Image: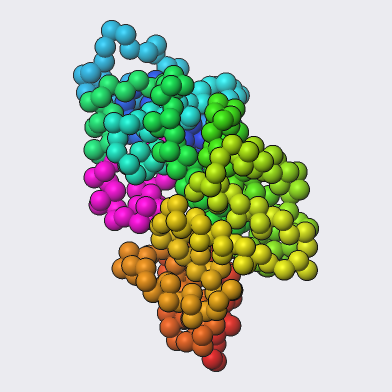
Amino acid sequence: MSTPVGEGALDDAFRAVGGRIRAALAARYRDLDLAEEAFAESCLKAAKAWKDEGPPRDTAAWLYRVAERTALDILRRRRTRTENRPDEPASEPTAEDRLTSDDAVIPDERLKLIFVCCHPAIGGESRAALTLKLVCGLTTGEVARAFLLSETTLAQRLVRAKRKITEAGVGFEVPEPEHWAARLSAVLSTIEIAYAKAHEDAAGSGRHAGFAREMLDLTALLAEMLPEEAEVLALAAIVRFAEARRPARIDSTGAMIPLVEQDPALWSQPMIAAARGYCARALGMSGPGPRIMQMMIHALWCGRRSVADPPPWKAVLAAYDILLGLRDDPVIRINRAVALAEVQGAEAALTELDRLDADVLNDFLPFLAARADVLSRLGRHDEARISFDRALALGPGEAERRFLERRRADLVGK
């Protein structure tokens, strides 16, 4: 069954400009909850109006204007408007309004809101989690999975984080440079996870596909703002190394192609060159940090020129060993286990995976996929099928689903 025209347009607009609209509303009204509520209501109104009348020519401008009007209505209901309230927004979009470019209508306040959400008053993971939800539009469930937390736990942290922003009277602006360092780690973590959401969709057609372009832009901007921060330059390089490989990530059937099987001739060499530029600058000013080592792993893979070049598994494993000493987390251990399977064998990899907390990771697709692979290599086909089935039950993207189904089908009769 095809998607209704209005519904498809709303989904596209939500993905393309939802983060910008929420950020602009939050910056305008200094209220994170209000920004979320107003944008959500504008989407509900769009769902009805666009179904009945068809989508406007400029869906983004329509959503932003309606969200502005909705925000003021909400403020009236709350009876919290002040004498210094913003000017009245434009009325409900007309046919003429639809001709207006959304770039001129919606201010891009995302980087400002990222710095707001990453204020030192907010603790640890909550900074990046709040930013991912407000600026990037990830659902509570998606953010919870990124941090390997339950939705309930994550929701409670988000409520506390927003309360702290309100109580601390945090200014909705990019702080002076002397205050950047206290927020930088959370800012980088946010961009890192947001890009990971785009990268995990090999086809580049899912709900978060637009993050790839946005994170390229944001990392370039941060590198201009902080040209002497090695970790900033390293993240800019990581995003470009990964994006350079996108043209080779899908086969003719629409299935994902894993990195080791990709044809390097299809990779974007200009993007790799840009990544190497950031890489050289980062290495020239710092010893190994977590993102420096991640950058080096990407650089090792992007050093291949053709499918005939042997995969750099030994060097990759050595880099993961160093990285693990700098930042020990389950994601790094899973990726290291994949390299370990190639260098020391599937049994060694399975031993490492079995040391991880299965109760926490049984809803984490990379863990299930890695475990299914090593189990199949060991001839433990029934267990491998269970892991593949659990991974597929998580609802991966179309390209990832096709890949997993193909690998599972290889076990038929075994």
Please state, as top left, top right, bottom left or bottom right, where the C terminus lies in the image: bottom right
What residue is drawn where x is 29% and y is 53%? Answer: 151
For the record, the magenta segment spans 134-158
> Is 412 on the left or on the right of 169, as rendered?
right
Asked if residue 68 is positioned above or below residue 149 in the image, the reply reads: above
In this view, the residue in front, 181 or 269, is: 181
Q: How many marks?
A: 0
- Residue at the image position 45 percent from the left and 52 percent from the top: 326
Pick the front one: 57 or 387: 387
Q: Quadrant of residue 251?
A: bottom right
Magenta stretch: helix, strand or loop mostly: helix
Q: Position of residue 226 (x, y in %)?
A: 54, 28
Query: Relative to residue 18, is residue 296 drawn left or right?
Result: right
Q: How is the image coloured?
A: rainbow
The question of residue 141 being in magenta is answered with yes
Q: Is residue 311 rendered to the left or right of residue 85?
A: right
Instruction: Specify whether residue 138 is in view.
Output: yes
- Residue at the top extreme, as displayed: 83
* Residue that protrudes farthest toward the bottom in the picture: 413
Where residue 350 sits in the image (x, y, percent)? 45, 77
From the top left corner, tell me how far across and down residue 104 is, in percent: 57, 21
In the rendered view, would you say 129 is above or below 179?
below
Say above or below: 384 vs 134.
below
Residue drawn at point x = 35 percent, y = 56 percent: 148
For residue 24, which quarter of the picture?
top left
Query: Is residue 109 on the magenta stretch?
Result: no
The picture places residue 264, in percent across and down from the top left corner, at: 74, 59
Q: Quadrant of residue 236?
A: top right
* Of the pair 240 and 66, the residue shown nearer to us: 240
Please say if 403 is above or below 345. Answer: above
Q: Is residue 372 visible?
A: no
